[in-house]
Image: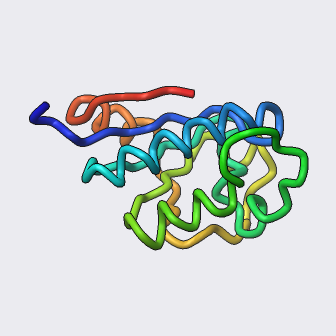
Amino acid sequence: MDNKEFVFVITHSYDAIERAAAALQLATNMAAFDAKIDFFLINEGVHLARKGFAESITWQKGFSPVAELMKSLVEDFDCKFYICASCVKPYGLEGAEWIKNAEVKPGSYLGELLMKRQNVTF
C-alpha cells in the first residue's frame, strides 16, 4: 500500500472507553509499521486530549491502558491530537490544559485531512 497516512476520528472517551482504547491500540500497532497517524477528536472524544484524563481512567476493560497508548503515540511516534474547535465550549473545555501534541482545529481541518489521508473512525 502506497498511502500509509491515516487520520483516526475518535468520538468517544469516558462514555465508551473501550472504543477509544481500541482505536488507540490499532493506531499504535499501525504506527509501529511506519504509518503516519494523527487523530481528530470530536464529541466525547475531545476529553482524551485533556491533560491528566487518560491517567484517571480506572474502569477500562481490555486493550493496553489508554494512558500508556497515548504516551507511546505522542512520545514514540509523534502523533498529533487535533481537538474539534466546535466541541471545546459545549464539552466544558474552555481554558483546559492539553496533552503534548494537542491542538484545537476547526472541522474544516478534518475535511482537509480526510481529502489527503485514509480515515478510521471509532
Residue at 46% in and 73% down: 75
Q: What colour scheme has been applied to the protein in the rendered image?
A: rainbow
Examine the image and state in which quarter residue 10 appears.
Answer: top right
Q: Residue at x 74, y 59 (%)?
A: 54
Residue 17 in the figure: left or right of residue 23: right
Q: Residue at x 72, y 50 (%)?
A: 47
Q: Quadrant of the C terminus?
A: top right
Residue at the location (89% across, 54% down)? Answer: 58
Which residue is at the far left?
Answer: 2
- Residue 93 lies in quadrant: bottom right
Left/right of residue 86 with respect to residue 33 in the rendered view: right
Could you say where residue 40 lies in the image, as x and y percent from the top left? 49, 43
**Residue 33 on image: x %, y %:** 28, 49
Q: Is residue 53 above or below residue 115?
A: below
What number of labels is visible? 0
- The N terminus is located in which quarter? top left
- Outermost right residue: 59
Q: Is residue 37 above or below residue 67?
A: above
Left or right of 7, for residue 70: right
**Horizontal relation, residue 29 to residue 85: left or right:** left
Relative image position of residue 73 (x, y in whole percent): 48, 60
The answer to whether 60 is drawn above or below residue 104 in the figure is above
Residue 62, by quadrant, is top right
